[in-house]
Image: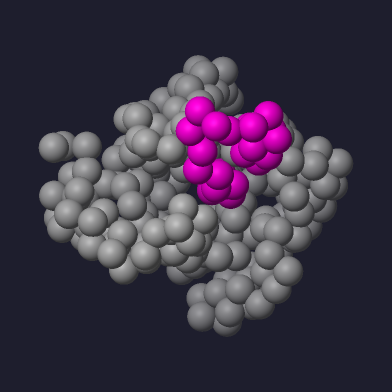
Amino acid sequence: MRGLKGKVAVVTGGAQGLGHAVAQRLSEEGCNVWILDLKQDGEKAAIAIQSESGNPVYFARIDISNESQVEKVFLKIGELSGRVDILVNNAAHFIFKGIEATPQDWKSILDVNIIGTSLVTQHCVPLMKKAGAGAIINLSSVSGFIGQSSFATYNATKFAIRGLTKCWAIDLSPYRIRVNSVCPGYIRTEAFDNSCIQLGLDIEEENTRISKLHILGRQGHPEEVAGTVAFMASDDASFITGEDLMVDGGYLAK
């Protein structure tokens, strides 16, 4: 895609699942990629991606809800890469609770999905201003558009991500920084399997049920979302900002 080669990209939650697919795609497109993740062996993912693409991939193990850690990693990125052109806010905490959600449940999910995302963006923006332009892609979801049983905690954060996207698009437009959200339907990743376990559901039975909710009759693949993220980061999307782009297999079209 146009305008990605040589760009510096930061992907939160990029050592696993959907984030890994995004980091891999951006690396394949010629970006220098920074993966920020809590995963203990995240460096292995970075090394594997770099060996395939031949482009530099760096790993930093951080908790994005910890401002001190976020500040330090962006100082490091500034020292080594000099700028950031692309930020993909993918990292998320998954808690599926309804009215029974405790204050600790709310604090736990908000600290990562909203405060963490905001901290990363806040500390990244100066490096984008230094670059003279940028693209921020926030991962929301179909869950940011609809109500779902026992999903109040998760959906609230995905609705909020869409609100942040539109506000930041306005605030950052004078600096030629575009901000958009990509909103997947159900994507078959380890996170899906883990959420089934958390909710006490049979993974394959739930996969069959969920697949039928999409017009295309299946869950999506991480690579399909990664391609959309790459497009939104590229010059091919240069006149798109403040938007929500669905990658949901027709989930919301029904």
Going 79% across and 50% down the picture, which residue do you hit?
73
Number of numbered labels in the structure image: 0
Quarter of the view holding residue 128: top right
Q: Nearer the viewer, residue 92 or 202?
A: 202
Determine if the magenta segment contains residue 90.
yes
Determine if the magenta segment contains residue 204.
no
Vertical arrangement, residue 231 with respect to residue 50, above or below = above
Looking at the image, residue 119 sits to the left or right of residue 206; the answer is right
Quadrant of the image containing the N terminus:
bottom left
Q: Is residue 32 visible?
A: no
Quarter of the view holding residue 7: bottom right
Going 13% across and 37% down the picture, which residue do you hit?
254
Going 73% across and 41% down the picture, which residue do you hit?
65
Coloured how? one colour
Residue 189 in percent (x, y) is at: 43, 64
Residue 133 in percent (x, y) is at: 56, 35
Q: Nearer the viewer, residue 92 or 21?
A: 92
Looking at the image, residue 113 sits to the left or right of residue 38; the answer is left
Q: Is residue 185 visible?
A: yes
Going 20% across and 48% down the picture, which residue do you hit?
213
Vertical arrangement, residue 165 with respect to residue 190, above or below = above
Looking at the image, residue 205 sits to the left or right of residue 10; the answer is left
Q: Nearer the viewer, residue 142 or 129?
A: 142
Q: Which residues, given as a range, are shown in magenta?
A: 89-112
Residue 182 in percent (x, y) is at: 39, 41
Residue 52 in percent (x, y) is at: 51, 80
Vertical arrangement, residue 226 with respect to residue 131, above or below = below
Quarter of the view holding residue 85: top right
